[in-house]
Image (spheres, helix red, strand yellow):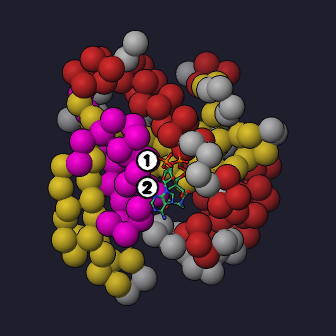
Amino acid sequence: METREFEIRTERLLLRPHRLEDVDDIFEFARDPQWGRYLTTPMPYLREHAVEFVEDRILTSRDLWPAWALVLDGRVVGGIGIEIDVEYATGALGYSIAKEHWGRGLTVEAARAVIDWAFRERGLAKVYAYADARNTPSLRVMEKLGMTREGRLRSHRKLRNERVDDVYYGLLREEWERDDS
Ligand SMILES: CC(C)(COP(=O)(O)OP(=O)(O)OC[C@H]1O[C@@H](n2cnc3c(N)ncnc32)[C@H](O)[C@@H]1OP(=O)(O)O)[C@@H](O)C(=O)NCCC(=O)NCCS
């Protein structure tokens, strides 16, 4: 798929593939410990981690893990991606946005567009997402996306020497079709 075809425009955002020149914008927000609190990203977050992240995004297969930089007014302010399991036709959604833009509904706006894209272009049967149970804003995003809370997996992961619970949310294809006007 050509880069242009892969772009998605929403009301306020451009979603496009990552580029090497995105490193500084990403480092700027990812270095904030509050941003990385519930993520498995390195802490402290150094510029070299942003370089690794962008290189990784560029090299990762667009078929298996389509991902986009979130561009607002010409700057990269976040990222969103969906890891596809081809055999099971499921996609695991992941997202983040710079702290200065939290609470403006931008993540929900981007996620809606990516979910639509994934069901349409990839014929998925289900999109799901999960977050550290303490990550209230992320759980709220999943709810606002119309996903159903499927369960809390206790002590399911390790995050910086701490055992954490994960909460899973899912959206089935038929639920998306019903709501897609
Ligand atoms: C989780 C995250 C992506 C949400 O992004 P966002 O753009 O602020 O999300 P939205 O504005 O679309 O929606 C957030 C919702 O959570 C609510 N919220 C924010 N902080 C909250 C809190 N502490 N308690 C309860 N609700 C909260 C917001 O009010 C909003 O809901 P509302 O529109 O009903 O008021 C963002 O906080 C982030 O990037 N965090 C760091 C990275 C991360 O944790 N990513 C998720 C990994 S699973």
Identified at 57% across, 42% down, the residue is 105
Asked whether 170 or 101 is in front, the reply is: 101
Residue pointed to by mark 1: 141
164 in relation to 66, above or below: below
Please rate how many residues cluster around mark 2, counting C-alpha atoms within 10 Å: few if below 14, some from 14 to 19, many from 20. Answer: many
Q: Quadrant of residue 72?
A: top right
Q: Which residues are magenta?
A: 125-149
Q: Position of residue 78 (x, y in %)?
A: 63, 50
119 in relation to 18, above or below: above
Residue pointed to by mark 2: 138
Q: Is mark 1 within 8 Å of ligand 1?
A: yes
Asked if the residues shown at circle 1 and circle 2 are in contact, with their CB atoms under 8 angstroms apart, the answer is yes
Q: Circle 1 sits in a helix, a strand or a loop, which is it?
A: helix
Residue 27 appears anywhere in the view: yes
Please rate how many residues cluster around mark 1, counting C-alpha atoms within 10 Å: few if below 14, some from 14 to 19, many from 20. Answer: many
Q: In the image as oriented, which residue stretches furthest toward the bottom?
A: 161
181 relative to 100 in the view: left or right: left
Q: Magenta stretch containing residue 172, yes or no?
A: no
Q: Quadrant of residue 82?
A: top left
Q: Position of residue 117 (x, y in %)?
A: 46, 24
Amino acid on which disc 2 is placed: Ser
Q: Is mark 2 within 8 Å of ligand 1?
A: yes
Identified at 37% across, 17% down, the residue is 180
